[in-house]
Image (cartoon, rainbow, N blue to C red):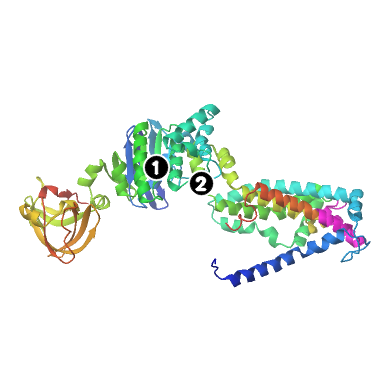
Amino acid sequence: MPRHRNRGGSILLGIFAALVFFFLLLPLLVVFPISLSSAAYLQFPPPGFSWQWYQRYLDDPGWIEATIRSLQVAALCTVLAMGLGVPLAFFLNRSRLPGIRVLDRLTAAPIIVPTIILSIALYGVFARLQLIGEWYGVAIAHTILALPFVVILVGAGLRSFDAAQEQAAAGLGAAWPWIIWRVTLPQLRPSLVSAAFLSFVSSFDELVLAMFLSGASMTLPKKMFDNILMEIDPTIAAVSVLQILLVAVALGLTSLFGRGALTTTITR
Amino acid sequence: MQLSVTGIIRRFGPVAALGGVDLDVAEGEFLTILGPSGSGKTTLLKAIAGFEIPDEGAVRLGGQDVTLAPPRSREVGMVFQNYALFPHMSVAQNIAFPLEMRRRPRAEVRERVAEALRLVELDSFGDRLPRQLSGGQQQRVALARAIVFNPRLLLLDEPFGALDRKLRESLQLEVRRLQRRLKLTTLFITHDQEEALIMSDRIAVMDKGRIQQIGLPGELYARPASRFVADFLGESNLLEGRARNGVAELAGFGAVPLPPAQPDGKVTLLLRPEALRIGASTAALPCRAEAVVLDTVFLGQSAKLRLQLDGGTEMLARLPLRPSDPPPPPEGSRVALGFAPEDLHVVPQG
């Protein structure tokens, strides 16, 4: 008979994990059935099955427009956050300047400052720059929120990277752009993919900044919010499910291209 | 290619990691820098590889001044302590890296990588990732990567430190054979004196940021130029005494004749443990004493004895043992000691 140490403990832990998973997935378990409801209002459990709310979403150019705009905003936000954040993470990791540790902590500031405060401040600046109502204005604002993810994740990746490898590459005849491209970045791939994913999702999901800055050109979360204020019907559930599916696809791509991304980068 | 280092100084704040180092390595020579940790040997290596710019002095490779040249233009192959293999590249890609950086044509790269793999006897391992190899195999990949581009100089930074003893010994000999065959000018860094003796054409002993002595391994072992070198290289008995008229008075042994032209005053004498003899065979020796055995360590081909002379001085002796020899004297027994005065070396003062 195989021997098990502390069997009761592992069963308890399994039950605990199952409960936490249930808690995590509960919203999905409600939203998904409602989106397929035959009723004209939010009702759980739904009285019957129908695709009508998905149909309504697809038929409404307002929803489609908002979806495309949100994808654009999230894509630009990701590009900006990576373009600015990765070099910043390198600087914070490599610099010998006094006080660099403090600077490193400061990069988390956008997470600490309440988004509503940030929104009000940015509204003032963006109004002057005439960026209100422009989709790229929202993307720029989202970049501020996404940057800490990038700096923290890439910074963690860099800390576990063996700098002797860059010396080795230099000694073998590589110039520094090649060293970064061929030796350093490939090994940071899990961190980079995680950072890009979180940047994308944080923007795609963001409501507060979008409410202040998007004006008439609404992002998807803003459109959903307005929709709830005006008419409560299960379209919102259908949109949510589609949004969840999109994020799930992004998550799938993340684990496909960033072996160990999101799970190993922070804990390493 | 010939390496010449002159007057290198490197300060870190108030501390001089290198306090004026001069060193010449001849073409095809295997020279070892031997020193304890903190002696400056790694800083010296970095200055030669280009990872560290010295405050003063010059590094010349084949007559060309490379003191300020970036590492990538030095054409120096280096094997790092932890190998620094690129974990995301296969063995073959690792070895191809320096050739690709030199924009060699693809066919040539393939051919030279195969040749390098053959050289380190890893022919069939090209497609593996470094983490799929053992420590010794990784070490050989690092070596292949460092020599595949025909470097002007090979630097080895304690490359055997992480390996177990048997593997280390076989790799030491392998590296040495390879180095001779390719006639590679090689600078080897280690803190392991045994390794230095096994591998080197010449050894430079380093301490406190300076080279204390440089010479043939046998020369350094037999005639160390300072207490530090005598102590660091091999095991030693250092005996203090006073010289007068070519004779030194040593506690326990009495008057011991010194080499000619030895001035009067304080002297430090080195006697290697294997030069100290024990038992009946000492009767014919001119310098004799009696001692108690403090402990005996059996080492297989020899035994190491710690002895205490009647005056209190402790000494080490190493007895060669053949299978037919009687066992070495046990702890607590009294034994006769002796040595021949020509086995003594006067260690210069200072």
Chain identity of mark 2? B
Q: Is residue B83 left or right of residue A69?
A: left
Tell me if residue A76 can be seen. yes
x, y percent for residue B222: 20, 46
x, y percent for residue B305: 20, 59
Q: Which residue is mark 1?
A: B156
Q: Which residue is mark 2?
A: B132
Amino acid type indicated by mark 1: Leu
The magenta stretch is A213-242
x, y percent for residue B233: 26, 49
Amino acid type indicated by mark 2: Gln
Residue situated furthest front in the rendering:
A1
Give the mark nearer the N terminus: 1 vs 2: 2
| Distance from Cα at disc 1 to Cα at disc 2 | 23 Å
Q: Is residue A116 above or below residue B9?
A: below
x, y percent for residue A63: 88, 51
